[in-house]
Image (spheres, rainbow, N blue to C red):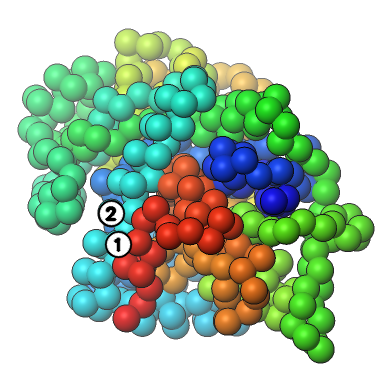
Amino acid sequence: MKVIVLGAGLIGVATAYYLWRDGHEVEVLDRADAPASETSYANACLISSSRALPWPTPTAHKTVWRALTDSAAPMRIVKPLDPRLWKWGGEFLSYANDNEYARLTKAKLAFAKFCQDELQATLTETGIDCGYLQRGLLYVCRSEATLSAATARAELVAKHGYDVRIVSRDEAIALEPSLANADFVGASFAVSDAQGDSRVFTRTLAKFLSARGVKFRFGVEVSATLSMIDRGYGIYANREPVEADKFVVALGPRSFHFAKQLSLKLPIYPVKGFSLTVPIKDFSRAPTRGGICEDSLVAYCPLGDTMRLTTGAHFAGDDTTFTDRDFVHHRESFESLFPGALDWRDESKIERWACLRPMTPSSLPILTATVDKFGDGTLVWNCGQGHIGWTMSCGSGKIAADLVAERHPSFALNHMQKT
């Protein structure tokens, strides 16, 4: 059958791969001029399955209050009067209890493992080189409080099959010698976590698919209309109707607006994150594997001769603007751990970026052929992967292909539904 994928980001291209593998005629539409040009352009590049924990914790009310009142908090509510955020936040807090947190934790960790396995299988099958390394990730703790929290988290994910080890300062330095001059007390080491350049993966996979008959159309704005008479719908590319047997919506944070055109309420809110890509000046002082500073929540990942630094979760609506001030925290945190590793002298070689990540209130993705009982199965939704889209990309793509083919999903979706 003919299937059109709406969106050529990481999720959309991964979906196209699984649809192509199933033998469908596949076309991918995107408004940008190249794959992975928005949310997938400059993310953390960490495949952090062991950290796939739900955002609505039993103490989330305190986190929300800090996000409203503390300008230095990593999570900030910048647009507190946004009605859309209030609705999203109400559902978010409905999950903030012990029972829901336990259910979401089990579902999300299991799905993340499934997704990482699928990513590794895809890399093997396609031969794509995106710098994927599964050497574990190191989560550095600079205080006893964060080390204690890391210990509790390691014990929690161990119950779900993840090997996360608490290591001393000396053991962490043995894993990452460039930490020798840093002030920290210990770390957690997630053995199965990995790293890789998601933009390279997405664009290389798109070339792989193009060479095998998958069509990509760029510079295309997609839209939808709803017939109020029979609840039928039409899909348009630059206002011209497009026809297919089925469509997959993989528009990231813009999936919300697409759904709105069909009078559907998709529970997605755009959460802004910031990334900084800086040339490495001294490789002997730079980390050789990715990780996170647990105290600052700045993530870092070496990508060849550059270092990717990421942090931030700003609830600011659809705004993607940024200022130099938004990246001060990145530099200060990284330099305190790895002083002198990066070259900050030439501004033209430093890339700043902000993107919107499609978060759901539960922090589980939306993988379904129906929303609000709308649709006849011809419109499949694959969105809402939030802050770990790289981790969830291939697994989500495989499930979307299952839904298109109307076969039993490769991962049991019933575990991801609210009870």
- Under circle 2, the secondary element is helix
Image height of 260 relative to 400, above or below = below
Image height of 278 relative to 359, above or below = above
Q: Identify the residue at image location x=28%, y=54%.
A: 109
User: Does residue 356 appear to the left or right of 295 in the view shown?
Assistant: right
Image height of 195 relative to 54, above or below = above
Near mark 2 (Cα within 10 A), the count class, few <14, some 14-19 or many ≥20, is many
Q: Which numbered dot is residue 273?
A: none
Q: What residue occupies the far bottom of the structure in this picture?
A: 229
Callout 1 amino acid: Ala
Callout 2 amino acid: Ala
Q: Identify the residue at image location x=71%, y=36%.
A: 214
Which residue is label 2 attached to? 110
- Under circle 1, the secondary element is helix
Question: Which quadrant holds residue 419?
Answer: bottom left
Question: Which quadrant holds residue 258?
Answer: bottom right
Which residue is label 1 attached to? 107
Residue 96, image x, y percentages = 30, 76
Q: Do the residues bearing badges 1 and 2 touch, measured as CB atoms within 8 Å?
A: yes
Q: What residue occupies the far right of the structure in this picture?
A: 240
Near mark 1 (Cα within 10 A), the count class, few <14, some 14-19 or many ≥20, is many
Q: Nearer the viewer, residue 81 or 252?
A: 252
